Image (tube, rainbow, N blue to C red):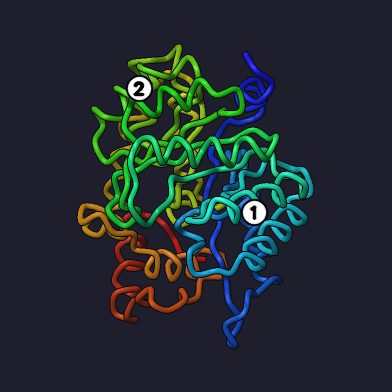
Amino acid sequence: MTDAKTWARTNLSGYIPVTFTPYTDSGTIDEAALRRDVDYTLSLPGVGGLYVGSVWQEFWLLTVPERKRLAEIVLDAVAGRVPVAVSATHTAPDDAVDIATHAAESGAGLIMLWPPFFGPRGENGVLAFFDYVLGRVPAPFGIYNTAITEVGYEIGLPVIRELADRPQMALLLSGAVRLDVFLETLAAVGRDIMVTSPVEEYFLVARMIYPELAPDVVMGSSRALFLQTPRQPYLHEFFLAVEKGQWHDAQKRLGWIMQAGEFAHGAALREGKTPLGLIKALRGAYGQSGGTPRVPIPAPGSDEVGQAVANLREAGLDPL
């Protein structure tokens, strides 16, 4: 096993939630709020790392200097307490190399890379894109792959097999919207690369069916930041039940997670959309910066946010 693959299996565990981008009233990055968000997130039980630069961080609306600065702030605020994964995703391969190089030199443990999210793409082109970046940045990498239509391209299993063989490739974050696709991928490449998911239901099934392949990692979750608090660590309790093989308890807790998550994720995700504005607003009610996203992402109405908070309160999650 290569150094990159060994590093991932040794250092990545627990919840690795996403980070968001808070803004000041003038629209610039609110660095102080971001640091407070990092400290809050690391106060949640079971958080084993952070993921910077995902779709939740509005990476495509940020300039390259802003993306670099965000990574610097998070890495400085974390101060080595947990591993940090930083996305270098970009449509231009040289910009992806620039962001990845900066992240690795700043202390990121893992560089996440999506396929190009716009323009004509095919298997050969996507594979060439990954090889171009990997060949210029000597660091552990992770692949992000999803069927969500906003991204516009889902890597097929033949290319995933090839990428999983690359020595630098340590992790696959699968955003598959079908459980059978996720399990097929795990079975096919789970011995060559860590295969994880941002959703608890896939994590539970994978740990039950493929305990020798499924890692003890839930990566890329936004639920972790609005479905629990330090006083009510519902997701951590679910994770512990899974790790102990207490399947009945885990399934019971998963039922609550899925029901509560439906208030914010359900309808939008079934349409292939990311309800970023609502999730940011909900975070403001649960101990974090919250705020509105950048244009053109729609901001939720006050009635929508109020109803979601009321639903979560009724489900047993008290706002802070």
Does any portion of residue 258 appear in the rendered image? yes
Q: Position of residue 169 (x, y in %)?
A: 56, 28
Q: Is the residue 314 above or below the residue 97 in the image? A: below
In the visual, does 276 lie left or right of 140?
left
Q: Is the residue 248 above or below the residue 285 in the image? A: above
Which amino acid lies under the numbered mark 2 shown in the image of this protein?
Trp
Of mark 1 and mark 2, the one earlier in the sequence is 1
Q: Position of residue 85 (x, y in %)?
A: 61, 44
In the visual, does 218 lie left or right of 23?
left
Q: Which mark is residue 238?
A: none
In the visual, does 44 lie left or right of 310?
right
Residue position for label 1 = 99
Circle 1 Cα neighbour tier, 10 Å, few/some/many (<14 / 14–19 / ≥20): many
At 64% from the left edge and 68% from the top edge, which residue is drawn?
A: 66
At 35% from the left edge and 53% from the top edge, which residue is drawn?
A: 151
At 66% from the left edge and 29% from the top edge, which residue is drawn?
A: 11
Residue position for label 2 = 247
Q: Quadrant of residue 187?
A: top left
Distance between the alpha carbons at the discs numbered 1 and 2: 41 Å
| Total marks in image | 2
Q: Quadrant of the N terminus?
A: top right
